[in-house]
Image: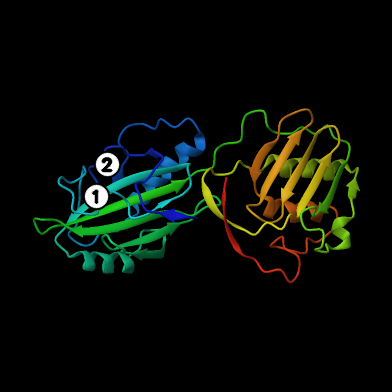
Amino acid sequence: MAVVSGAAVGAQASPSGPASSASGSIVPAGSSTANDPHEAAAQREAVRMLAAFQAPPGATLAANQPDPLPSGLDRPPMKSAAESQVASVGWYETSQSPDDVLAWVKAHPPTGSALSGGGSGSGPGFVTFSFPGPGRANWLIVTPQSAADGRTIIRLDASAVWTPSRPSGSTLGYTATSVSVVTVNPMNPQFALPADETATHTSTDPAVVHQVVDLLNALQPPVPGTKNCAADMGITVRITLPGLATAAAQAGGCGEVVITPQGGAPEYYDGAADLIPKVYTLFGVTWSRSTGLPPGIARTGAAGTR
């Protein structure tokens, strides 16, 4: 996941900062305005990550953003390049120094998280903790900085990336009577592909057809934004459901799957890396390249915009 400096983007789970409940926990301010249920879930997850923070002894949860803010706390030290993310901010005050705060939180990571990095650059020092998510890691950033009055202000930035829900009516039916799969490489034909993949495999077994349809219906749209992708060598797995739809799964690159319903417009999804081996397994073929690259070709990094 790419990271760049700047302010967090996306819907704010707590637009005016988290509020303090009677028990001292962090709760969201106001109700969710998310239209997508995945976004609403991400809002709840962002607030949960703030609440998982283990504050240093004696630190006080602030009900609102401190004013004035110490230098460098007007923005998160980094953010995800994903365009569909929810950002929520929390604040604490303490008499401990920023270095002591960082040492404490490293030794006492937020519940359910793992220390994933940190830094300082030209601003205050910070540490990041990752939380498991559905296919993507969410994170909490802890940034302490000294204030003019001698206090240390702790900024918490919770970021939860969410996947846009699949459009209504985009799922495929079970009307196809057969399904076929084949691997092609029109971009780099000089790279030899295994014979059992370049051969077209066809099945008329209703169970196989239904399972392929289920796999395609389970795909989700990509998270919009910039991401780092593997090299794309042009290897594509084509899945054909006659009279119903065709699918082109990108074996390298960003792992895109393009589904074109019969008589409809192309639809774009993530998940080719999982889809391809599962489909081939239904035909008794073991997918030979987990990277999607021919033997002897090294994986390289590349940035792609989705």
Label for residue 17?
2
How far across and how far down the image is residue 39, in percent? 47, 38
How far across and how far down the image is residue 104, in percent? 27, 67
Q: Residues within 10 Å of mark 2 (few under 14, many from 20)?
A: many
Element class at badge 2: loop
Residue drawn at x 86%, y 56% is 198
Quadrant in the picture for residue 213: top right
Label for residue 91?
1
Q: Seen in the image, is 28 located left or right of residue 24?
A: right
Q: Seen in the image, is 10 located left or right of residue 120?
A: right
Residue drawn at x 51%, y 45% is 225
Label for residue 25?
none
Res 284 seen here: no
> Residue 75 or 273: which is nearer the viewer?
75
> Residue 62 or 68: which is nearer the viewer?
68
- Distance between the Cα atoms at labels 1 and 2? 8 Å
Element class at badge 1: strand
How far across and how far down the image is residue 1, in percent? 50, 55
Seen in the picture, residue 193 relative to 70 is either above or below; the reply is below
Q: Amino acid at mark 2?
A: Gly
How far across and how far down the image is residue 286, in percent? 80, 61
Tag 1 and tag 2, C-beta contact below 8 Å: yes
Seen in the picture, residue 282 relative to 293 is either above or below; the reply is above
